[in-house]
Amino acid sequence: MEAGDIKSMTLEEISAAMKELGEPAFRGKQVFSWLQRGVGSFDEMTDVSKSLRARLDAAYYIDAPSAARKQASKLDGTVKYLWELGDGSCIETVLMQYRHGNTVCVSSQVGCRMGCAFCASTIGGKVRDLRPAEMLDQVIFTQRDSGLTVSNIVLMGIGEPMDNLDNVLRFLELVNHPLGLNIGMRHISLSTCGVIPGIQRLAELELQLTLSVSLHAPDSETRSKIMPVNRAYDVEELFAACHSYFQKTGRRISFEYAMIDGVNDSDWQADLIVKRLRGMPGHVNLIPLNDVAESPLKPSRRVRQFQSRLESQGVTATVRRSLGGDIDASCGQLRRKAMENGKKGQL
């Protein structure tokens, strides 16, 4: 019988497992709490009997990532981690420090199959989905290594969260639990490149998180060129799903928009965003494009003009503050370099 991933289990599932082992219900809470603190083995659970620890060790496993590389910005304190997982795969996690608290950007997959032209994460394609425990560990071990308390999470790292939604939803349940890290849903943002079935499922769940849609172009022709997902879920269908999401949940959606020179930064495209958002409150987050060596796309020189055109027509638009400018800022770049070098590097 294959050992089970106990850190990906909910409190209810662990409590049920304890009952099957003939243990009292409170043992489930003890074990769950230890796991959420990032213990590396059952032997570290000092208030659990040795006999139970031995039985748990026979039936389940606990793994943890190791920091293969770490880059810290001297400009703003941003830290990027390259974590090595149990199977040797590598993922990235970014710690960002703001006045309102510390935010961790979490990856949801090893690699990505979405193929966005401006993103380094998708180079090499998707390797596999991350388990809930592997997403949780990014928060736990970033917090432990940095010594900083994490108050906010953005699921905007490597991978498409909606392409691994079952595991993502379980991660959200784990990280939100009061016996664990207890990070509230209102402090969590989930990003998608526009996978409509995932948006529809989230709408039905009515979670109090922030849905963030990677838009990057309001017209189908441009979006299909830079985001292959648009060929499966056209931008008009995407906006229809967004309007339905707002009507169901009442929650404002954030639209991410990487500003690409000569591609998506025209006045008519700003006007089209305004038209598409009509009847729905939306926040447009303009992102100065990070240079990716493998991509011919370059940062726009019209970010402020684009912002002004949106705002003049009543759309809230902000320009994302660039963090980690002196390290591999673009998502996936650090992992990509490690893949090219054939080694994970040293701290």
Image (spheres, rainbow, N blue to C red):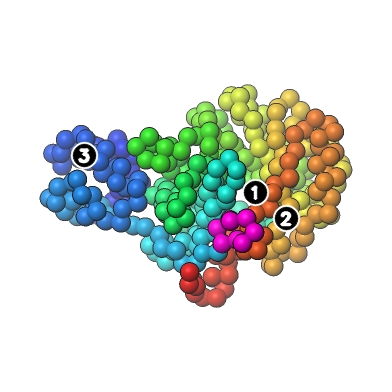
Q: Which residues are magenta?
A: 72-79
The crowd level at tag 1 (other Cα within 10 Å; few <14, some 14-19, many 20+) is: some
Tell me if I can see residue 23 in this picture: yes
Residue 76 painted magenta: yes
Q: Report the front residue among 124 and 170.
A: 170
- The x and y percentages for residue 7 are 33, 48
- The x and y percentages for residue 277 are 74, 31
Of tags 3 and 1, the one toward the viewer is 3
Q: Residue 229 shows which numbered tag?
A: 1
106 relative to 290 in the view: left or right: left
Q: Secondary structure at mark 3?
A: helix
Label 1 – label 2 distance at C-alpha = 19 Å
- In the rendered image of this protein, does residue 288 appear above or below residue 256? below
Q: Secondary structure at mark 1?
A: helix
Label 2 – label 3 distance at C-alpha = 49 Å
- In the rendered image of this protein, does residue 160 appear above or below residue 296? above
78 relative to 117 in the view: left or right: left
The crowd level at tag 2 (other Cα within 10 Å; few <14, some 14-19, many 20+) is: some
**Residue at coordinates 47% horizontally, 34% vertically from top-left?**
184
Q: Residue 93 shows which numbered tag?
A: none
- Amino acid type, residue under disc 3 in the picture: Arg
106 relative to 229 in the view: left or right: left
Task: Determine which quarter of the picture holds residue 41.
Answer: bottom left
- Amino acid type, residue under disc 1 in the picture: Val
- Residue wearing tag 2: 289
- Residue wearing tag 3: 27
Q: Secondary structure at mark 2?
A: loop
Tag 1–tag 2 contact (CB < 8 Å): no
